[in-house]
Image: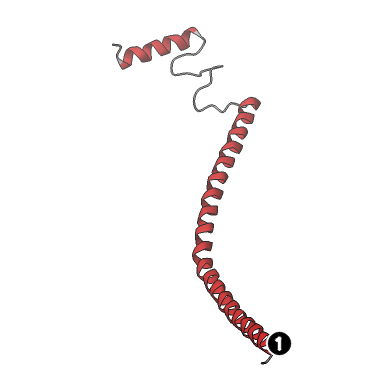
Amino acid sequence: MASDKDVLDKADALLRRHGAAAGGETGAFPILTDLIDDPAAKAATEELAREVFTRVMAEVEGRLAADLENRLAQHLVPQVHAAVASALGDLRQELANAIGDAVAEALKQRPVK
């Protein structure tokens, strides 16, 4: 197996063969710290940024929607139950009044013997 020094020596030799001196300028070869002004790379980066943004927003909206639904359910269920109970109470009273009125009317219209 090659030692670290052997690997570095081979890299230096490769750079010398292709026009760059060891420890000197790299010339036409970009290094990791060089910024590359490539329109295609910029477009790909912008597309990736849009895709990441879209995915993050979808995840956040999904979580927020679920949380909002749970909170609304917690607050609205007791209110809906109270409203339904009140409406049923009102209907029972109206139904009792209607039945009483119908019975009274039927008794009035019945022939007296």
Quadrant placement of the N terminus: top left
39 to 5, vertically: above or below: below
Residue 9 horizontal/vertical position (percent): 37, 12
Label 1 packing within 10 angstroms: few (<14), some (14-19), many (20+): few
Residue ID at (49%, 64%): 74
For mark 1, what is the residue? Answer: 109
Residue found farthest to the front:
113
Residue ID at (50%, 56%): 67
27 to 56, vertically: above or below: above
Residue 48 horizontal/vertical position (percent): 58, 33
**Horizontally, is 13 left or right of 73 in the view?**
left
| Quarter of the figure with residue 3 | top left
Q: Number of labelled discs?
A: 1
5 or 85, which is in the foreground?
85
33 or 38, which is in the foreground?
38
Residue found farthest to the top:
17
Residue ID at (56%, 71%): 84
Residue 98 horizontal/vertical position (percent): 64, 81
108 to 19, vertically: above or below: below
Residue found farthest to the bottom:
113
Q: What amino acid does circle 1 point to?
A: Gln
Callout 1: helix, strand or loop?
Answer: helix
**Horizontally, is 2 left or right of 35 in the view?**
left
Quadrant placement of the C terminus: bottom right
39 to 4, vertically: above or below: below
Residue 31 horizontal/vertical position (percent): 50, 22
70 or 108, which is in the foreground?
108
